[in-house]
Image (cartoon, rainbow, N blue to C red):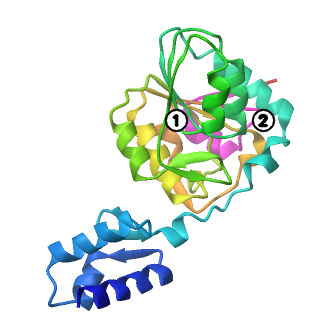
């Protein structure tokens, strides 16, 4: 019975992005909620699901990214990304505990960071490799599942690691920004991770070039009023600018 029940649950995970515990309880009325929770934990260990509040999310759906590949983005808007990264350096003080997101603009920021004593945590293996070219920073690479398209680490292991990290300044790169949906990303585990960083960091600085404007991807990790500074290469649309100003968000347009 145990194997047949799990076979049914596994089939559900191939068909649906989310299965609620309530749905499983309805499908298996003679099975306790505790047993069904153990089933979810089993599939999480097997790499088929991620346990979330109220149920489980299927890895088949959340490991699919809606974003362009890192290597494709690496050659786009090079000048704008460098100007944004250079401006971002001004927000870094000696001894700060920093979080560096993944992304091509962050890779440029990593190369421009002064060789000073910082404690830096990153989800980008390529970011970490760039940082260790310097002699002074302490570099922490988050462990977990690697997204091949973004060269970024996320997942439950990454979230648990970040729970123990204090962050003075976080530099985050969204995949899209719209007035309706806020800052978005195309991969659910990365969305969860960015959401956690926004909650933990004392100061959140968003780095984004104009290609991200009016672009909406499936997962929102925060709204405009949850960040402190936006550094971009072009003026934001009027509605976004007004919302940012009303929330006290600093907007910096590089030249």
Judging from the image, what secondary structure is the residue with disc 1 in?
A: helix
- Can you give x and y, in whole percent of width and height, for residue 180 in the image? 57, 56
Quarter holding the C terminus? top right
Q: Is residue 147 left or right of residue 29?
A: right
Segment tinted magenta in the rendering: 231-253
Asked if the magenta segment contains residue 245, the reply would be: yes
Report the residue at 36% width, 88% height from top.
Answer: 8
Q: Which residue is mark 1?
A: 246
Quarter holding the N terminus? bottom left
Q: Is residue 164 left or right of residue 147?
A: left
- Can you give x and y, in whole percent of width and height, for residue 63 in the image? 56, 63
Q: Which residue is mark 2?
A: 234
- Can you give x and y, in whole percent of width and height, for residue 117 in the image? 52, 9
- Can you give x and y, in whole percent of width and height, for residue 111 in the image? 71, 22
Report the residue at 77% width, 32% height from top.
Answer: 81
Indicate the quadrant where residue 54 lies.
Answer: bottom left
Position of 3 relative to 67 (above/below) = below
Asked if the magenta segment contains residue 207, the reply would be: no
Q: Is residue 43 left or right of residue 185?
A: left
Whether residue 104 appears in this view of the structure is yes
């Amino acid at each position: 019975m145990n194997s047949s029940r799990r076979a049914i649950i596994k089939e559900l995970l191939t068909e649906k992005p989310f299965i609620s515990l309530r749905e499983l309880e309805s499908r298996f009325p003679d099975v306790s909620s505790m047993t069904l929770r153990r089933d979810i934990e089993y599939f999480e260990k097997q790499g088929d699901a991620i346990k979330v509040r109220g149920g489980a999310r299927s890895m088949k759906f959340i490991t699919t990214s809606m974003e362009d590949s890192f290597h494709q983005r690496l050659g786009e808007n090079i000048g704008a990304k460098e100007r944004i990264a250079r401006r971002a350096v001004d927000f870094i003080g000696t001894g700060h505990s920093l979080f560096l997101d993944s992304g091509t603009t962050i890779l440029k920021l990593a190369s421009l960071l002064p060789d000073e004593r910082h404690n830096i945590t990153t989800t980008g293996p390529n970011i970490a490799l760039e940082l260790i070219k310097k002699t002074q920073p302490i570099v922490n690479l988050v462990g977990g599942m690697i997204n091949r398209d973004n060269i970024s680490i996320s997942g439950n292991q990454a979230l648990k690691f970040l729970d123990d990290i204090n962050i003075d300044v976080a530099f985050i790169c969204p995949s899209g920004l719209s007035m309706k949906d806020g800052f978005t990303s195309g991969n659910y585990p990365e969305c969860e991770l960015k959401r956690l960083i926004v909650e933990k960091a004392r100061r959140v600085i968003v780095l984004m070039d104009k290609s991200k404007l009016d672009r909406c991807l499936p997962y929102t990790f925060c709204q405009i009023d949850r960040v402190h500074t936006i550094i971009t290469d072009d003026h934001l649309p009027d509605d976004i600018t007004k919302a940012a100003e009303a929330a006290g968000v600093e907007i910096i347009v590089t030249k």
